Image (cartoon, coloured by chain):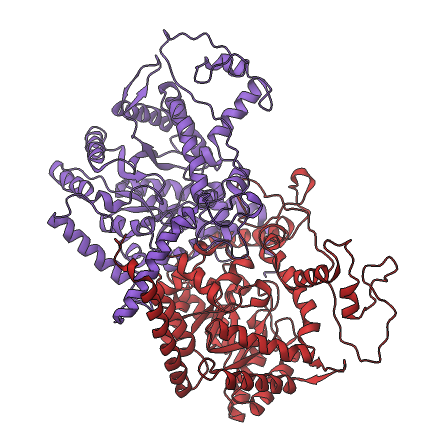
Chain colours: A red, B purple
C-alpha cells in the first residue's frame, strides 16, 4: 500500500477496507487464494517476492538500459522481467534528434538571431519563426522551409521507426511522447493557434463522420499565451474560445455535428494539494460552463507516475463538494493502461471503480479482472478502448494480440477512441474502427455500429440529447448501409466461407 | 462451417447443433448478439465480412510476403490485418541456411563421398556422419567438427534472431519450426538415438526437479530405423524401449521419479481415413501398454492445418470403440494456439470441449471465451500453458503481454509445459516457471507451488498414484521452502513495499 497523507483519516480507512474487499472478490477464483498456507510457505513466498522486487531494479533496471551483467557486443540490451527468452534483443543505440522549442513573445521582444543553423547560432536563442523556416539549412537533412516543416512535424509525431525500433518499450516510447507535448504546448496554448487547432479538430472529425466528441483538455498550465505574446489567458477564456468555435462549426454543419464537451484533466504528478487547486478550478468552470464540462480525469504515464490511490482524499472531497454546490462532474479516469499484473497502474482499476468512474480510459488490463468486468457490465461503465494508441505506445505489438475481444465477449460496454490522433496520425476514428474490424472474424460491420452507438449512449449527454444524437446517427447509418449494399450487391450472391 | 464428409449423418448434425448452441452461449454477452437486425444491416454486415475475407488474401496475403500494392524500398513488408498502424515494418530479406539431412543406412550401403564441403560434392549424396564432421570445411562459418556441430545444432533449434527478426510472425516461425522436425526425425527415430534421447529426456527432467511427465510422442511415421539401418521398428517397439528406459531411470532415482506416460499424437493434416488408422493403432497400443498410453492428440500448425471439426466422425467413433473395448484414452487436445478471433484455430476450443477433452494444450485464445472458461473451471479441464513457446512462436511478444493472468484470475486450472525444450532451449520447466513469476506482481512462490501440484492433480494418474506423487512432491517442496527461508531469512526483516 502506498502511504497517503493523513492515514489516520477514518474515511480513508473505510475506503481502504472497501478496496481490499473488492480486490479479494476479484481474485477469489485464483488457485492460490482463499486457502491457509503454512507459515514457512508464507515466509518463503514473501522472500521470493522481495527478491523479485529488488531484481526489478538491480537486474532489469525497470525496463531501462541498466548496468546489467548481460551486455552482448557492448550494447545495453533492453531488459525487463519476462523479456524474450532466448537472449536479450540488442537495443539499437538511442538517437534523439534535437527537437525545436517554440515560444510566443510580445512584439517588443527583439532578437538578432536570424537562423537556427548558422555557425554563429547560440543554442537557446530564439529566432522569429518565419525567418527560422526560411533560413533553415540543409546540414540537417532536407533544408529550407520544407526541411524546417519536416523537422517540426517529426517533433510532433511518432515515427514508425521510433515506435517499433528505437523506443520499443512502453517506458522509452513515453519519453518520446512526453517530449512531443513539451514542443506542442507552446504552439497549442498560443491563442491564435488554439482557436485554429480547435476548429480543425472539429472539422476533421466531422469529415470522418464523427458527430459528437468528449475531448480531454489539459489544464495543468494555468495560463495560455495571448496573440500579443503575453502569458495571461486564464482557463475560462480557453473554454469561451472552445465554445465560440464549437457554436460556429455547429451552425455551419447542422446535420452533421451535435457538439462537443470537455473532460478537464491535469497530470498525475501533481501533489495532493496541487490537485485540490485543479479540482476547485474544475468546479468553477463547471458553474460557468455547465454544458461544456463533461468530467474530470488525471493523465500521464500510469506506470511511472502517481496512482489514483495517492489522491483518494482530494478526490473524495471533490465528490462531497459537488453535492454542496449542486454540481455533477463525473470522474472519467484513465486506468489500467499497462501490461502490469498487480502493478500500481493495474491496481488503478479498483480505485477508478470505487471512486465511481463513469467510464474507464484504456482499461487495457481490465481483462485480467473478472469481478471488475462484471461491475462494468452490470453498472454500465464503458471502456474507452484505444487500439492504435495501445499499439504505438507498445502495450501490444499488433491488433491480433490486443485484448479487446475479451471485453466484447464479456459484454463490457466498449467505445473507441483515437487517443492522440495528431501525434499518431490516426485522425478521426476510421483507422481505429478498421483495426477492430480486420483483426477478427467475429466482429462485423454491425459490431462497429453497436460500438459507435454506445459512444453516444455512454456519453455525458442528457437522455434527450442522446436521443437526438442517436436519431441523427441512425439516419446516417441507414444511408451508409444503403450505399454499401447498392455498390456491392454482387458480393452477396457469392459463396460464403 | 467447414464441410465435412457425410454431412447427412444425424449424429454429426446433432453435434453441429450442440456446437452452435455452445458458441451462442459463449457469445451471449456481446453487444452485437441476441438482437434483431434489419435485413439491410444484415446484408451490409455480410458484404463487409466477405470483403474482409477476400482482402485477407489479396491485400494481406494471409501474413505471407505478398504482391501487395505497398512496397517501401522494394522489399515486401510483412503484412497482416491489424498490423502496426504507422507503416509496414520492413521485413528483412529471408536467409534460410541449407539444413543438414540425416538418414540411417544399412552397413552394406556404400558411398564414395567423404566431405559435404568439397568442390566435388554432389548435392543429395550422403556422407558417413563421422567423416562429414571431420572434413567439414570453414567455408561455412567455423569449420571442422566444431563447425559441423554448430551447423547441426542450428538446424535443430530456433535462434533468437530467427524468432525476433527474420521469422517474426507465427506463420514464418512455423516454417522454421517444421524444418527442424524434418531434420530431427531421422535422428530421433533411429533406435540407438531414440533410447539415448528418452534417457536424457528423463534425466534432464529429474535434474530440474520434475517427478512425473506426460509426453507427446508423434506416431505419424509408422516405422523407426533400427540400429542396422533398416526402417522396420514398429510403434509397439518404440513403447517397449520407452518403458525399458523409464523403468531403469525410475529404479535408479526411486525418490525423485514417479514415471512417465505417453500422449499418442499424429499430425492434423492427415485425412479422416488416415486418422482412423492412427486411432485404431492407439487403441491397440493402449491394450498392450495400459499404463503407458495417457491420451490422444492432434498436433501441427493450428492456424493453417485441419481444425478438429474436420475430424468429428472418426473422433466420435473412437470414443464409442473404446467403450466396446473397455478402454479409457482421453483426448488431450491442442486447441486455441492462435491470436485469431473466430478463426478455425480459435474455434477448435469449442470442439475440444465438446469432444470431452481432459486438458487443453496451449488454449492461448481461451481467454476470449467466457463460457468456455467457466466450463473449464467447473469441469476441471486444465490448460497446459506454454509461456516460452507462445513467445518464441510469436503469439505474444513477451511475458507481460501473455494472457495467463486472465486464466489464473478466472480460476481456470493451469499447468505449465515447456512444449519443445530441445528446440527452444528451455530444458526442464524452471525457465517457464520463472517467466510466470517475474512478469507479475500478483503471482508468488506459492502460486507456482499450486500450479506444480495441479500438474499432478490434473494428470491421468489414478487417484492412488496421484496421492503418492503429491506426497513425494510435498516432501521436496517443504525442503525447498526451508532452504529458501534459511538462506534468505534476513530479507524477511526488511521493509515491505
Q: Which of these two is toward me, B283 or A443?
A: A443
Q: Is residue A33 visible?
A: no
Number of residue marks: 0
Left or right? Give the position of B223 relative to B277.
right
Q: Is residue B204 visible?
A: yes
Left or right? Give the position of A264 relative to A459.
right
| Residue ID at (79%, 68%) | A131
| Residue ID at (85%, 61%) | A121
Residue A240 sits above or below residue A140 on the image = below
Locate residue A475: give its quadrant: bottom left
Give the percent coordinates (x, y) of residue B303.
36, 45
**Quarter of the image that includes the N terminus of chain A:** bottom right
Give the percent coordinates (x, y) of residue B221.
30, 27
| Residue ID at (65%, 46%) | A92
Give the percent coordinates (x, y) of residue B478.
45, 45
Residue B350 sits above or below residue A227 on the image = above
Give the percent coordinates (x, y) of residue A234.
68, 85
Residue A286 sits above or below residue B105 on the image = below
Q: Which of these two is toward me, A407 or A280?
A: A407
Residue A170 sits above or below residue B273 on the image = below
Amino acid at each position: 500500500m502506498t502511504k497517503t497523507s493523513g492515514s489516520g483519516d477514518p474515511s480513508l480507512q473505510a475506503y481502504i477496507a472497501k478496496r481490499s474487499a473488492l480486490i479479494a472478490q476479484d481474485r477469489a477464483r485464483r488457485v492460490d487464494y482463499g486457502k491457509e498456507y503454512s507459515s514457512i510457505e508464507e515466509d518463503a513466498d514473501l522472500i521470493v517476492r522481495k527478491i523479485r522486487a529488488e531484481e526489478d531494479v538491480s537486474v532489469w533496471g525497470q525496463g531501462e538500459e541498466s548496468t546489467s551483467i548481460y551486455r552482448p557486443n557492448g550494447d545495453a540490451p533492453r531488459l525487463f522481467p519476462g523479456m524474450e527468452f532466448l537472449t536479450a534483443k540488442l537495443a539499437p543505440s538511442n538517437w534523439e534528434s534535437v527537437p525545436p522549442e517554440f515560444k510566443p513573445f510580445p512584439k517588443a521582444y527583439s532578437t538578432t538571431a536570424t537562423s537556427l543553423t548558422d555557425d554563429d547560432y547560440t543554442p537557446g536563442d530564439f529566432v522569429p519563426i518565419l525567418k527560422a523556416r526560411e533560413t533553415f539549412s540543409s546540414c540537417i537533412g532536407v533544408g529550407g522551409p520544407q526541411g524546417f516543416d519536416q523537422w517540426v512535424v517529426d517533433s510532433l509525431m511518432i515515427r514508425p521507426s521510433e515506435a517499433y525500433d528505437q523506443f520499443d518499450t512502453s517506458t522509452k516510447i513515453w519519453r518520446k511522447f512526453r517530449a512531443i507535448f513539451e514542443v506542442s504546448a507552446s504552439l497549442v496554448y498560443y491563442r491564435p493557434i488554439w482557436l485554429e487547432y480547435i476548429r480543425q479538430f472539429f472539422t476533421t472529425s466531422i469529415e470522418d463522420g464523427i458527430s459528437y466528441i468528449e475531448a480531454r483538455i489539459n489544464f495543468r498550465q494555468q495560463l495560455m499565451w495571448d496573440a500579443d505574446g503575453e502569458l495571461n489567458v486564464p482557463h475560462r477564456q480557453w473554454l469561451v474560445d472552445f465554445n465560440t468555435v464549437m457554436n460556429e462549426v455547429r451552425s455551419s454543419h447542422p446535420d452533421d455535428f451535435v457538439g462537443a464537451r470537455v473532460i478537464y484533466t491535469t497530470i498525475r504528478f501533481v501533489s495532493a494539494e496541487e490537485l485540490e487547486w485543479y479540482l476547485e478550478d474544475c468546479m468553477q468552470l463547471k458553474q460557468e460552463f455547465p454544458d461544456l464540462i463533461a468530467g474530470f480525469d488525471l493523465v500521464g504515464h500510469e506506470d511511472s507516475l502517481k496512482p489514483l490511490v495517492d489522491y483518494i482524499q482530494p478526490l473524495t472531497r471533490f465528490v462531497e463538494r459537488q453535492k454542496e454546490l449542486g454540481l455533477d462532474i463525473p470522474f472519467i479516469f484513465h486506468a489500467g493502461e499497462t501490461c502490469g499484473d498487480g502493478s500500481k497502474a493495474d491496481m488503478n482499476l479498483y480505485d477508478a471503480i470505487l471512486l465511481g468512474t463513469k467510464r474507464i480510459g484504456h482499461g487495457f488490463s481490465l481483462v485480467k479482472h473478472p469481478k471488475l468486468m462484471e461491475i462494468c457490465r452490470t453498472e454500465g461503465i464503458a471502456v474507452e478502448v484505444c487500439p492504435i494508441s495501445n499499439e504505438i505506445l507498445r502495450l501490444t505489438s499488433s491488433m491480433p494480440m490486443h485484448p479487446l475481444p475479451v471485453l466484447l465477449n464479456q459484454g463490457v460496454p466498449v467505445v473507441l477512441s483515437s487517443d492522440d490522433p495528431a501525434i499518431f496520425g490516426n485522425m478521426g476514428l476510421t483507422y481505429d474502427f478498421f483495426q477492430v474490424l480486420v483483426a477478427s472474424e467475429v466482429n462485423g460491420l454491425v459490431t462497429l455500429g453497436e460500438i459507435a452507438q454506445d459512444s453516444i449512449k455512454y456519453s455525458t449527454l442528457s437522455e434527450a440529447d442522446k436521443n437526438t444524437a442517436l436519431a441523427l446517427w441512425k439516419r446516417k447509418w441507414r444511408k451508409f448501409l444503403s450505399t454499401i449494399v447498392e455498390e456491392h450487391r454482387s458480393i452477396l450472391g457469392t459463396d460464403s466461407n
